[in-house]
Image (spheres, grey):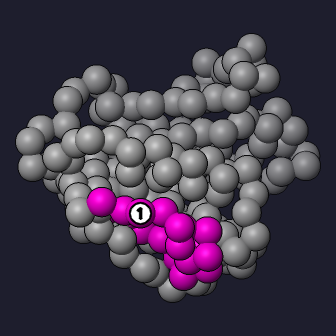
Amino acid sequence: MTCISQGKIVIINATNIALKLDGIGVYSLNLLKGFVKLETDIKFVVFLNRNSEQHIRNINFPDNFNIRWVTPFISPDYNFRGHFMRLLYSNLLSLRYRKSLIFNTSQIEAAFFKSDQVITIHDLIPLLFKENHKKQYCYYKYMLKYALNRAKASNRALSIAESERTIRSSSFM
């Protein structure tokens, strides 16, 4: 994996932190709490939707963090529409910050036009149970697969829950 060069900016897309926290939102919130403890010169730009404000209120962001607020409609609180808006917004970020590493804390934020990114995949259930997850199955099978293939091999990161380790699909990756 390549090092983040001096002066480089890391974009953290944490738009999945919703008013009502779910597992992925808790994961993203805990990542932010861990990142603020790092002693580093790396500049972080964190994108959050307005619905997440109550959850990050008590995080003391150091000077190397820049918080950017986006509309609350880019949030899981709005179900499919909110997820779709997060996907679109992530791809807008990838075009706007072409020279920066983008850390997507959920598979829904995968960028199709960006090779220098981290995509966190929390589970593969939609691939296993196609009949129960028709929209997600298409996204995982075609769109997420495309985004992963676009990612530079040296910068690709895949995080799979422990219970999923035995079901990695070579046709997916």
Relative to 12, say whether 51 is above or below: below
Q: Which one is in front, 29 or 112?
A: 29
- Residue 139 placed where, x, y %? 64, 51
Q: Which residue is mark 1?
A: 60
**Label 1 packing within 10 angstroms: few (<14), some (14-19), many (20+):** few
Q: In the image, is 48 to the left or to the right of 93? A: right
Residue occupying the point 53% across, 67% down: 58
Q: Which one is in front, 156 or 36?
A: 36
Relative to 169, say whether 90 is above or below: below
Q: Residue furthest left?
A: 6
Looking at the rendering, the stretch of residues picked out in magenta corresponds to: 45-62
Quadrant hosting residue 51? bottom right
- Residue 86 placed where, x, y %? 54, 68
Q: Residue furthest top?
A: 166
Instruction: Note whether residue 150 is visible.
Output: no
Amino acid under disc 1: Asn
Q: In the image, is 78 to the left or to the right of 45? A: right
Q: Secondary structure at mark 1?
A: loop
Residue occupying the point 73% across, 63% down: 21
Taking the magenta stretch, the answer to whether it contains residue 3 is no
